[in-house]
Amino acid sequence: MARVLTYAPKDTWIHRLSGVTKMIFFLLWSIAGMLTYDTRVLAVMLAFSLVIFKVSKTEWKQVGTVFKFILFFLFLNLLTIFLFSPFQGTEIYGTKTVLFHIAGHYSMTTEQLFYEFNIMLKYFTVVPVVLMFMVTTNPSELAASMNHLGISYNIGYSIAIALRYVPDVQADFSKIKHAQEARGIEMSSKTSFFKRLKRMANIIFPLIFSSMDRIDVVSNAMELRGFGKNKKRTWYMGKKLQRNDYLTLVFVICFVIAAMVFTFYDGSRFYNPFQ
């Protein structure tokens, strides 16, 4: 069974970066993507994200399934925003240009479309960096590098274990899905899109329960081995920050600062093309 979102060693400059460098890049990039609603900043970030994703040589079969789920949640998010705040865009941008009336008090406006377009951009800006981080970072090396920076090895191990078990959770999802199909529940493209979504959602609860069982097993095993007894520990894997690591950190820090200055220079984090 093919597993996705697991570390795949390759000879790229992104793979050669320290796990800490990639984690800091991912965190700062995500924070910038969450804070800004400036379409111009998001467009530049999206371009950089796609280039980084391409350079990492990440294959579609590694991330395709997860990307489809992200698109599903993006669709639900955009739909929810419109259902509960159909004129959020008009309140933000201060104008109202009705494209067409839907029903009741629901009308589609240019401002609402632009607002939800920015939300979509925010997703697509962060998602490639998240996937790149997952498939180019060795969990053991990441934990060791974090500890070398002074972070508790308990925290490092927690993050490493989470990264290691992502493919196992996805494998469980596939097993449950195949078991459902064996019982005659159609979950392929032969049925309608919304039926597939509903049936996929029914897998979530069994998946949560199986994941909870795995957490209990791992925690008991680590406790039996005396994990956390000592304040320090030795590491088999570890990588010191190199020249490219420092250059990457300088770039992302400078970029995020510039993006925030550009976003808030007029007192608002929203780019308004309607005024």
Image (cartoon, rainbow, N blue to C red):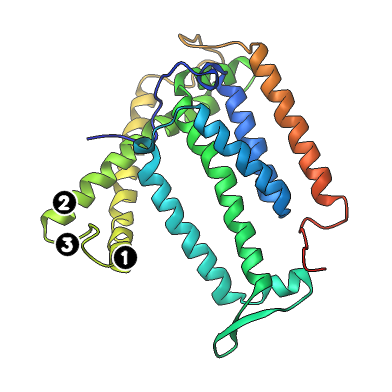
Q: Quadrant of the N terminus?
A: top left
- The label on residue 179 is 2
Mark 3 vs 2: CB contact within 8 A:
no
Q: Quadrant of the C terminus?
A: bottom right
Q: CA distance from mark 3 to mark 2?
A: 9 Å
Which quarter of the figure has residue 72? Answer: bottom left
- Which residue matches tag 3? 185
- Which residue matches tag 1? 193
Mark 2 vs 1: CB contact within 8 A:
no
Q: CA distance from mark 1 to mark 3?
A: 14 Å
Please tell me whether mark 3 sits on a helix, a strand or a loop: loop
- Judged by depth in the image, the label closer to the viewer, 2 or 1, is 1
Q: Earlier in the sequence, mark 1 or mark 3?
A: 3
Image side of residue 155 versus residue 267, left or right: left
Question: Is any part of residue 36 visible from this angle?
Answer: no
Q: Is residue 156 above or below residue 66?
A: above
- In depth, the one of 143 and 226 nearer the eye is 143
Image side of residue 208 versus residue 234, left or right: left
| Residue type highlighted by circle 1 | Phe
Residue 261 position in % (x across, y down): 83, 44
| Residue type highlighted by circle 3 | Ile
Tag 2: Cα neighbours inside 10 Å, few (<14), some, or many (≥20)?
Answer: few
